[in-house]
């Protein structure tokens, strides 16, 4: 072909609409594997953020070069809510006519729930699929604390507010059996409906698998029709070729390239932030707010409130999205965040998207937002206030320690003692009761005012009761079921940003080098133990010894409550700390 003919042909191809260009064969591997401790410590790059994962899926959906996604969740650690958000985003991706291949290793029911969105599921040849269903339980420390000579008094005046039961009971209460049972029912319903519709199973078959079969090798998974192939890269290539009608796939990767199952040589990520000064697109700020509602630790309410205030005054920022994952904690911190959100929303929309848990003080902090959303599996609500009193119930005596005190004021010796204070008198318990009831009434009134409900309507779903996202929506406590992708759409709508207009996403807080270093060091248990000892260098030596051998979320809970011994708090049970503290790859 003559040169001028080649040039003419090229110009014609470039002038054709995208719909007339030949279909492309690219597959983006979403590598959501957790890095090993060693590689995480030595890696120069941070794990992929949840926002970037969602934006990458969205970019791939509109990219003509991309025919599908390889979802690598062979070592993903995340809660059901995160899985639901990813699954929802991939459902929307498939709705564009593109394909998804899921790769799993040792997978539980949440992994399989996410993987079931795919056209093809590939399991590692040594992988195992375990579909046990869902359970919820709690360990109880009452007897152990009594053996140590440590007493715990529960200052509880609401039926479902069970935040101290771990330390005051030895079995589940009827209230917790009811409320957590309802939450489990909702989570199971979401999982059942997704898996049965995606894999062509009947409800009877689903429950037969859960109740009678539940554990499968790779070969067993294939024989049962739960997966479509066994192997690694070659199995994925074969599945991609089948979906491409025989053409060979080309792989790109989002996430860690070294552990890529497709051996992709080129990276792929979210769209680059558009540049320019005069026509700079609007900014949507995305703030991650994780941890107990405390002023300077956990959610760091003081810094968070300042950040919200500063962003709301920036001309370029059109909306703020706050991702709250919190089991509650301090009253002052919860109120400070709620006030900061209320102030900011006078200038721009502020949308709250709830993570795996956002209840009690976590809900209090969210209640003033322009729009609140949660996933179906989010633990939220828990509108209530509670307190507990940890005291010396023979610990000092068993160690041969005695303590004497001179006091002015009948209750001035409440906190006196070598290790812990004394038990409360009935008069002191009554004073606690009056304070807790007053604070509860304020909490209920604020929710009623912000949510457009009556006091009685809020009280009927309050008293410390937790709700799934679906139950919270029905009760009027949130505005919609959704995750971060949905929050972005709502932010655009409320801010008046057209759907097709480019947007710059800015993520906060922006970690410093020291923050990243500490985060990596804390992946090693020995460093976590050293941190506990350093943190408690001047604290109760008995509790330091106990903490070193407790699960991290239990130790965290004990430290938090002991530091606020006797304080009235909108806080959830320590089980919520486990939800919060789950090592999730994506944040």
Image: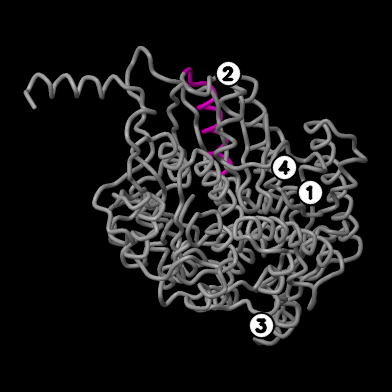
Residue 335 magenta? no
Q: Nearer the viewer, mark 2 or mark 3?
A: 2
Of pointers 2 and 3, the one earlier in the residue sequence: 3
* Quarter residue 512 falls in: top left
Q: Residue at x 53, y 20 (%)?
A: 497
Q: Residues within 10 Å of mark 2 (few under 14, many from 20)?
A: few
- Label 1, label 2: how far apart the Cα atoms are: 30 Å
Magenta span: predominant SS is helix
Tell me the residue that label 4 is attached to. 364
Q: Secondary structure at mark 2?
A: loop
Residue 401 disc label: 3
* Quarter residue 333 falls in: top right
- Which residues lie in the magenta part? 300-315
Does 337 sit above or below residue 247?
A: above
Q: Position of residue 121 (x, y in %)?
A: 48, 62
Quadrant housing the N terminus: top left
């Amino acid at each position: 072909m003559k040169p001028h003919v080649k040039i003419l042909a090229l110009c014609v191809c470039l002038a054709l609409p995208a719909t007339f260009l030949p279909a492309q064969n690219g597959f983006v591997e979403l590598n959501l594997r957790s890095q090993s401790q060693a590689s995480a410590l030595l890696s120069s790059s941070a794990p992929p953020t949840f926002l970037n994962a969602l934006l990458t899926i969205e970019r791939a959906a509109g990219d003509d070069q991309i025919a599908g996604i390889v979802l690598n969740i062979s070592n993903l650690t995340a809660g059901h809510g995160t899985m639901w958000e990813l699954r929802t985003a991939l459902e929307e991706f498939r709705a564009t006519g593109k394909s998804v291949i899921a790769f799993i290793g040792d997978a539980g029911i949440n992994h399989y729930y996410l993987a079931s969105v795919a056209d093809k599921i590939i399991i590692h040849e040594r992988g195992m699929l375990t579909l046990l269903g869902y359970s919820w339980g709690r360990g109880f420390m009452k007897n152990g604390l009594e053996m140590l000579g440590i007493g715990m008094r529960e200052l509880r005046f609401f039926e479902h507010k069970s935040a101290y039961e771990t330390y005051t009971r030895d079995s589940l209460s009827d209230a917790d059996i009811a409320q957590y049972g309802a939450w489990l029912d909702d989570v199971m319903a979401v999982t059942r409906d997704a898996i049965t519709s995606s894999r062509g199973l009947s409800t009877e078959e689903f429950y037969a698998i859960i109740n009678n079969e539940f554990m499968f090798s790779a070969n067993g998974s294939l024989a049962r029709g739960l997966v479509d192939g066994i192997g690694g890269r070659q199995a994925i290539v074969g599945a991609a070729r089948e979906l491409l009608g025989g053409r060979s796939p080309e792989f790109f990767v989002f996430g860690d390239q070294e552990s890529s199952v497709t051996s992709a040589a080129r990276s792929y990520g979210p769209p680059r932030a558009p540049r320019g000064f005069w026509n700079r697109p609007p900014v949507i700020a995305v703030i991650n707010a994780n941890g107990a509602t405390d002023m300077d630790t956990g959610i760091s309410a003081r810094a968070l409130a300042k950040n919200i205030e500063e962003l709301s005054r920036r001309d370029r920022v059109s909306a703020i999205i706050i991702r709250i994952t919190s089991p509650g904690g301090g009253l002052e911190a919860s109120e400070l965040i709620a006030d900061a959100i209320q102030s900011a929303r006078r200038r721009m929309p502020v949308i709250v998207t709830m993570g795996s848990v956002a209840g009690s003080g976590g809900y209090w902090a969210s209640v003033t937002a322009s729009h609140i959303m949660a996933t179906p599996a989010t633990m939220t609500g828990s509108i209530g206030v509670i307190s507990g009193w940890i005291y010396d119930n023979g610990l000092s005596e068993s160690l041969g320690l005695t303590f004497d005190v001179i006091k002015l004021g009948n209750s001035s010796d409440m906190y006196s003692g070598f290790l812990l204070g004394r038990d409360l008198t009935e008069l002191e318990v009554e004073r606690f009761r009056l304070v807790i009831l007053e604070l509860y009434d304020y909490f209920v009134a604020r929710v009623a005012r912000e949510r457009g409900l009556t006091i009685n309507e809020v009280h009927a779903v309050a008293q410390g009761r937790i709700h799934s996202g679906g139950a919270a929506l029905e009760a009027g406590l949130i505005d919609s079921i959704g995750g971060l992708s949905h929050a972005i759409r709502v932010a655009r709508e409320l801010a008046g940003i057209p759907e097709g207009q480019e947007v710059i996403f800015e993520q906060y807080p922006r970690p410093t080098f020291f923050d990243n270093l500490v985060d990596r060091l804390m992946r090693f248990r020995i460093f976590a133990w050293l941190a506990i000892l350093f943190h408690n260098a001047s604290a109760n030596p008995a509790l330091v010894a106990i903490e070193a051998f407790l699960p991290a979320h239990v130790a965290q809970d004990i430290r938090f409550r002991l530091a606020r011994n006797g304080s009235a708090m909108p806080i959830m049970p320590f089980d919520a700390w486990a939800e919060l503290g789950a090592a999730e790859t994506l944040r």
